[in-house]
Amino acid sequence: MTQTVTSTHPFDDAVELAAEAAAPGMFRGHTSAAYANMVGPFGGITAATLLRAVLRHPERLGDPLSLTVNFAGPIADGEFEVVARPTRTNRSTQHWSIELTQDGVVATTATAVFGIRRDTWSSTEIGAPTAPPATDVAATEFPDFIAWARNYELRFVEGAVPDPDSGEQDTSTSTLWVRDTPPRPLDFPSLTALCDVFYPRAFLRLGRYLPAGTVSLTVYFHADAALLAAQADDAVLATARAQRFGGGYFDQSGEIWGTGGVLLATTHQLVYFKA
Amino acid sequence: MTQTVTSTHPFDDAVELAAEAAAPGMFRGHTSAAYANMVGPFGGITAATLLRAVLRHPERLGDPLSLTVNFAGPIADGEFEVVARPTRTNRSTQHWSIELTQDGVVATTATAVFGIRRDTWSSTEIGAPTAPPATDVAATEFPDFIAWARNYELRFVEGAVPDPDSGEQDTSTSTLWVRDTPPRPLDFPSLTALCDVFYPRAFLRLGRYLPAGTVSLTVYFHADAALLAAQADDAVLATARAQRFGGGYFDQSGEIWGTGGVLLATTHQLVYFKA
């Protein structure tokens, strides 16, 4: 008797979508306990799932250029439906509108721009943060109640999660080496999820946990498929900081750097907080 | 015989929307020659018009928190239709999906988050760029074929539009004092338009004009109505820079600073270019 053991990476399990044969662009998915956050799923896994709906659409043109995800309401544990609709297809770019619903109620909306890249003049004007090699930085244990973080190997160079003795601080920058655990080759959905790997910047500034959640997340993809393939399952250097806190919201900007200091993605978000 | 002269500001003329009585959230608008760009309208005026459709919607809750506009295709001179749809309304936030069409063809899509702000701890972590007072900086004449720029008083502190002798340069930062001309009190639509006031960063790096256009624009609003009222029609200090150029696209991040160094908005965009 032979036994076949198939093993799916928890990430692939979490972003799995079943296409509805009757309606192109309509998919069924489900939340994954492995990527649960304090309330509902990790925003990064939801963003990755919505991007994946476009990637799996039969009419999809090219690779992702930009993605904006709006977290409109909580996602309950269980099944959800994703509809991805091409709103306009041009010669080399394509625009998408995406909605995640549960029982007909909208929980998340998104827009995406896909396109075919051309060779052009190139220049990276910003620089990667200074950091020792990933192997020289200790891996961080996240608190047990944040399930999703157990799927990442997180090595903070700067701005680790505050502990009770941290106190307030003047800057909100976190820089960390991060990769999926178990290791998994980087692709567009996992790069998208990594753009949301930063815990809320208000925790860092105030030195304590407080209610917070991403309202809107934008990713600009600089990596093409070849660059992702070259990155394979090596750790990326992720860095983010807030710009302005006030009136119950703050904005955050970040970058995801690949091996050799190549810029894979830039990312921005608006975050709700209570303090 | 008495004569009444009513004068509308060209900005208000350009973002004017007529509500369709039969369908709440459906509006008719038209392009404005005063805000024409090289091809089609100035992106900032389109973004402002889409925001205004939400502001005019009878179900609108609170003030704008974030806006993402995707420029899906050209807008031809003439009439267009805008549909603004609330996708989800929570207790203190509201999510919107907006589409601009011409003859049923989608030209621009957007999502927006509106909400009611609460008093919280606040901090501005970034600083305004150093600049002499607006009155000490000469106003720039834009080339005549860029109609929209004639509606702005532009005083470049750094990174003015290149001329034939400029040559290439290493950084893509522009910083300028800017306000509507004739002066007009700042409101959410005009702040939105100002977030797109930066000419393409690739012009500055390469020292020449080239084909370029915004693909996706995001605005995070930090100003509330009181802060806008305090700004009145004073010039704002606008600054922006690119992060990465390559594969036919670059991303840009910027900030709009008000009087006294208050941060009114942060803004990001992905831009197509050919070079």
Image (cartoon, coloured by chain):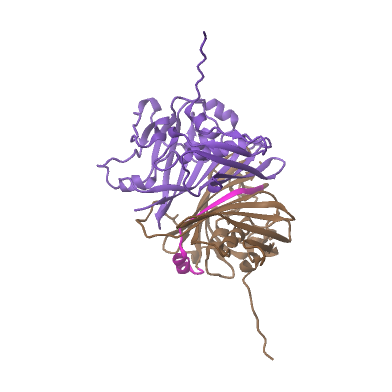
Chain colours: A brown, B purple
- Would residue A254 be seen by someone viewing this image from the given angle? yes
Residue toward you, B182 or B12: B12
Q: Looking at this view, is A174 or B154 the one in front?
A: B154
- Give the percent coordinates (x, y) of residue B181: 43, 27
How many callouts does the rendering have?
0
Query: B90 above or below A97?
Result: above
**Within the image, what quadrant is residue A206 found in?**
top right
Give yes or no for residue A219 being in the magenta stretch: yes
Residue B21, compared with residue A122, is above or below; it is above
Report the residue that reaches farthest toward the left: B165
Q: Residue furthest top?
A: B1
Between B70 and A86, which is closer to the camera in this rendering? Answer: A86
User: In the rendered structure, which segment of residues is drawn in magenta?
Assistant: A212-233
Q: Is residue A37 left or right of residue A204?
A: right
Left or right: where A238 falls relative to A53: left
User: Residue B250: x percent and y percent?
Assistant: 42, 51
Q: Position of residue B239 (x, y in %)?
A: 43, 39
Q: Residue furthest bottom?
A: A1
Residue B110 shown in magenta: no
Q: Is residue A173 visible?
A: no
